[in-house]
Amino acid sequence: MKRKHIQHLYWRIGFGILPAELERLSKKSKRQIIDDLIGTSKKMSPLKIDTKEIENLMVGTFEEVKKNIMEIQKLSRKKTIELNVAWIDRLAKPEALLREKMTLFWANHFVCEDNNFVFTQQFHNTLRTHALGNFKDFVVAISKEAAMTKYLNTKQNRKQRPNENFARELMELFTLGVGHYTEQDIKESAKAFTGYSHNMQGEFVFKKHQHDEGTKTFFGKTGHFTGDDIIDIILKNKQCARYICEKIYCYFVNDIVVESHVNGMVNVFYEDYNIEKLMRFMLLSNWFYDENNIGTKIKSPIEFLVGLKTVVPVDFKKPKQLLYIQKLLGQVLLNPPNVAGWKGGKSWIDSNTIVLRLKLPSILLNSAFISKVEKGVSIDAEFIANKKEVLRNGLGKRFKTESNWVYFNRMFKGVEISDLENHLLLCDINESTSLYLNSLKKVSKREYCIQLMSLPEYQMC
Amino acid sequence: MDRRKFLKQSSLASSLFFVPSFVKAFEEVATGSLGYKRLVIIQLSGGNDGLNTVIPFRNDLYYKERPSLSIPKNQIFKLTDDVGLHKSLFPLKRLYDNGNLSIINNVGYPNPVRSHFRSMDIWQTATDSDKYLQSGWLGRYLDNYGAHPYNAIEIDESLSLAMKGDTMNAIATQDARILHNLSKDPYFKNVNKYQNDAHLSEHNLGYLYKSMIAAESSAKYIYETSKTATSNKEYPNNAFGKQLKTMAQFINSGLKTKVFYGSLGGFDTHVNQLNKQKKLLEVYANGIEAFVQDLKENDMFKDTLILTFSEFGRRVKQNANIGTDHGTANNVFIIGDKLKKQGLYNDMASLSDLDDNGDLKFEIDFRTIYATVLNKWLEVNDEKVLNKTFNKLNFI
């Protein structure tokens, strides 16, 4: 497989690829590579932070637990930070790469958050479990997640007082998209989701006496439908397959949809809603590797951060600073803006985030220093060291990080300095930027790496 | 100024010099054409207890539902025969007496949500409570009527959803110098130097270059313009006071900014509310007083309207921890010169006719306030920003 295509593939279903691995894969065929990717993602290892402390506070009667609520929430906030950090680490060193990237994708599709960490973590791993599975099983599982019954109020959805929140978002955001259902469909399907609740352990509880057993008329069908029946009926509508395929296309291929490509995906997906099969089809298709799909997507903040860590491992001495950076970049994992999730694409970029993105590689990895030494100017080692010393006490002071350049030098040992941009950037460098870059001295691989990472081009994948 | 007029002006300007038109636009927009009227939004995060802020001190129900949380009559600054302000708000009473304060009671929205995140989201996106939007109302104001990021500034490190539009975004800064320093690395300057419109039309990469140039230009403009204004005005020594001081410096320097956004957090008073709220309201009122004086001394107050809101009010009945739980409707403060309706805009909410949760039933939709401010103060088409028609109120 062509190197450029492998790099493209690995940016879209991962966070970039290092030279040795690229070299290894370049001897394999596309099919072999995709088979391996899917094969290594068969295994699902949940991501877990110890929750005993919280669980101990959740034993006893409702009244007893209620007394502990403040403590539970406080601990939950702490644990959520831990899971956030662990998730970033997992993304930077994944065993099941495709599954992990899909989990990240689904976390912005089935958007949810909760102030009880036990439920947050359970929901998070449900995303991972079904990430490449059957979409119907996925939707059913999501509808019964404790965190979701709280987030979209299915818990308050009772026979006498229906709450339509979940029914509405199920169709608008999770399966069909706006305009493919009526208000009446929402009312009727909400009845089917009455009686949904959960116990303290986060297991689904169906409260039969709160469930509306009457008939519901939904999408032209009438019956004593349950929530599962409703999901079944929704998925019979081909629009559901289309909605999901378009979203996957925008995320993994291009934010400008090509109708004929998506049609092909829809036909595959609609057969049995097998997500793995859909991904295989998409990754094997020729159009996935079209020139105008390569290096044309704006990295999400998480793709940007994890991609950075993949090239130069960086440790945050204070975990809160890692979350703080996510906040400044506009995407804090496990803390979505609302159920519609992050909009992505251009909306990641505003005046503040672009400045930060351009400056962050140098701040986190290189004492805030970007070399501007011109070609032909001779400098000694001390020159740069002195510059860094000054900066380290200024901007460089903001974050307590430790970067592993030894690792970088080892990984890029066989790469010519002139070839570095082909490993770090996926799109061509803008003409005049390239002229400027060529007027600068390539002091070292490290300094050149920082220069490349400080370009708008590095924001693309 | 509308977008078409803006484009016309900027393309005219850019033909004179060989620079990208959108860069030229930063320098060439006629200073007066955007108008001088500016809006300041102050967000009280956490859900301020409105009933202990504007107090119905003759209502027996108020004292009955809050046996250990109500404010005694002798600790209230009376505005009318039955309504008074929390004593921490004494500085606001002075504004009230000068006719610079209008209090809109019982503001909310249909089917209220009692989650902080979601309710704040509703206030910031100005949407119905069962709809979700990914752009904020002030961001959409920029989409339709803004020309540069700095037309709306949030005094923070990152932008709230309220300030993000579909095509344009505001800019956030707590310190103009730091933002400027971050953006002015000579490396970026050189990367930007030779860009022209042709190269920048590229879909996503071009957008990044444009954003980068706009950011650098905005940061430079904000820093260089605002440093001309120096103020000796004393502000309370706390983060909120610092925010307002920065904001006043921006305003007094004549920045062409139409919207400023600031916030004060900590109002989620489930436990031992009395002391916490007393301190917070003090921080709020003292800061606002200094801010208004500062603007008055610089003759900027007459063109400034300050709107204060919180994502929801709190339950009428106090809880077991001498605090209050999340509620619904709340009061909104409007501070400005020559208000049409000074003092209490409307009556306080009924404390006997509550919803099933024991919360207030709202009377005024917050979006009618937004619509009024957009239409009568910023003088733009509010429907374009709010995507819906709302009645206008009469406070300005």
Image: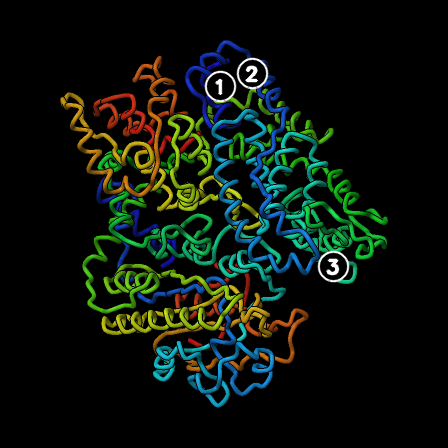
Q: Nearer the viewer, mark 1 or mark 3?
A: 3
Secondary element at tag 1? helix
Q: Where does the image place residue B235, in percent across and percent down from the top left?
A: 27, 68
Structural crowding at the residue carrying mark 2, measured as other residues with C-alpha within 10 Å and reported as few (<14), some (14–19) or many (≥20): some
Q: Where does the image place residue B78, in percent across and percent down from the top left?
A: 44, 86
- Residue at 50% x, 9% y is A27
Q: Are marks 3 and 2 on the same chain?
A: yes
Residue at the spot of label 1: A6
Q: Amino acid at mark 3?
A: Pro
Q: Nearer the viewer, residue B58 or B225?
A: B58
Q: Where does the image place residue A5, in percent across and percent down from the top left?
A: 48, 19
- Residue at 50% x, 87% y is B82
In the displayed structure image, the side of residue B94 where residue A216 appears, left or right: right
The quarter of the displayed image where residue B253 is located: bottom left
> Dots 1 and 3: beta carbons under 8 Å?
no
In the displayed structure image, the side of residue A57 where residue A399 appears, left or right: left
Residue B173 visible (yes or no): yes
In the displayed structure image, the side of residue B255 where residue B266 appears, left or right: right
Residue A33's label in the rendered image is 2
In the displayed structure image, the side of residue B315 where residue B48 appears, left or right: left
> Dots 1 and 2: beta carbons under 8 Å?
yes
Secondary element at tag 2? helix
The chain letter under disc 1 is: A
- Residue at 50% x, 69% y is B272
The quarter of the displayed image where residue B260 is located: bottom left
Residue at the spot of label 3: A162
Q: Amino acid at mark 1?
A: Ile
Residue B199 visible (yes or no): no
Judge whether A252 appears above or below A335 on screen.
above
The chain letter under disc 2 is: A
